[in-house]
Image (cartoon, rainbow, N blue to C red):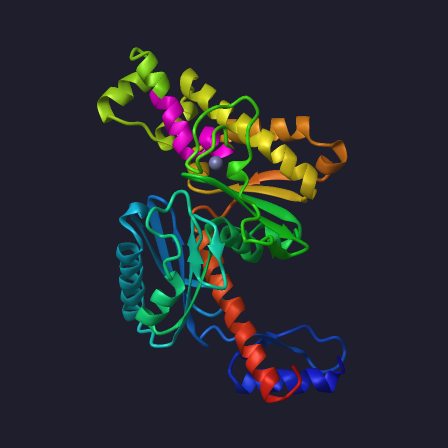
Amino acid sequence: MSRSSIGQYTDELLQARLLEEGPEGESTGGRRSRLLRLNSRWGHVVGVAVGATFLNVGLFDFYSEELESTACEIDIAAGPRVILAQIAEIAECLCRTHRTNNLAGIGIGVPGPVNVQKGWVESPPTMPGWNRYPIAACLQDRLGCEAYVDNDVNLMALGEQAMGIGRTAEDFVFVGVGTGIGAGIMAGGVLHRGHNGCAGEIGHIPIWGEKAPCLCGRVGCLEAVASGAAIAKAAEKRGRQDNGTILGHLLQQQGQLTAEDVGRLAAGGDEDACAIVQEAGRHLGQALTSVVTSLNPLAVVLGGEVLLHMGDLYLAAVREHIYKGALPLATRDLSIVRSSMIPKVGMVGACTLVIDQLLEVHRGGRLSVHGQS
Ligand SMILES: [Zn+2]
């Protein structure tokens, strides 16, 4: 573009207040340059991450800076009416606290396959009662702003792209390990959703020789042997087998065990817990070997609430199996790391999605006004 065209476009965006002038840049001999940036006050955005058992809701400015966020426990099986009302209430409360009357949009990540155009989930195995419930339309009506829905791990990948490792890597895979397991695939800087929107459903890759039943109705899926729920189940099984073990004692005390319990005990060196963590890491590493061989990413980023509780032992098991199983060329430059943005990465990604979509809408409107589309 010529200097004058750029000037014309940026003037329009400045007039529309979508851009604002930032600090002065370096002088390169002539006049000092002035940096332009998105106007942080153009509108506020709510980012939401919904898990099977938790909810994170945050209020952001248009520069993706978090103003405040809230986390609470939920049961996703309570259904969309209850959970969406809860989300709307928190969003309204955050807006009131920060005296925000220009809520531009809300983005929400949910743990199931999403039809992005319709704004709902399709046959989600872990979200009973949510099938084709109009999530986006419902939030749009209630809050009076634009609403966008996407898969939770896709949004974690977007969050990582905006503020994490994605700033230096265009090709990476974000793996979310929670109650289920999924991946967000970033290829050439673009999120790969696949023909039916279920790309990255790696939780249902069959693991050779495994027979554990999966919520999808089949057996031996990765999710059934390596997710947070599978780790908890393996620990309860071990505890029941031998109530003289630490896992056995804890099971008797609490009535149930969680992945968090297992992670904590493994960090303290408990042999049974360490074995369970390593086994889960081995299964995940095996499945990711296929992913790395197929996609040749620069990085595999591990996130999701289970990663909050799993130490280096888990990461080491995942790494070991990928490096052992994948082609040397596919792993030559590969790094396998834990996301530095857990637990907020999904919420940040939801905020990023909304801002991207709103800019896209704005661009469409402007171009059609000028008849240049
Ligand atoms: Zn499955």
Decide whether the magenta segment is chiefly helix, strand or loop.
helix
Front-lying residue, 108 or 305 = 108
Q: Can residue 360 be found in the magenta stretch? A: no
Q: Is residue 312 above or below residue 354?
A: above
Q: Residue at x 24, y 20 (%)?
A: 252
Q: Residue 179 placed where, x, y %?
A: 40, 38
Number of numbered tags placed on the structure image: 0
Q: Give, as a single range, the part of the protein colored magenta.
A: 222-236
Tell me, yes or no, if residue 264 can be seen here. Answer: no
Kindly indicate the quadrant of the structure image that contains residue 269: top left
Q: Is residue 217 left or right of residue 16?
A: left
Q: Is residue 119 left or right of residue 209?
A: left
Quarter of the picture holding the N terminus: bottom right
Quarter of the picture holding the C terminus: bottom right
Front-lying residue, 198 or 248 = 198
Q: Residue 52 placed where, x, y %?
A: 36, 44
Q: Is residue 38 above or below residue 343?
A: below
Kindly indicate the quadrant of the structure image that contains residue 369: bottom right
Q: Can residue 227 be found in the magenta stretch? A: yes
Tell me, yes or no, if residue 126 can be seen here. Answer: yes
Kindly indicate the quadrant of the structure image that contains residue 287: top right
Q: Residue 105 placed where, x, y %?
A: 42, 69
Front-lying residue, 55 or 130 = 130
Q: Residue 4 placed where, x, y %?
A: 72, 87
Q: Residue at x 58, y 83 (%)?
A: 366
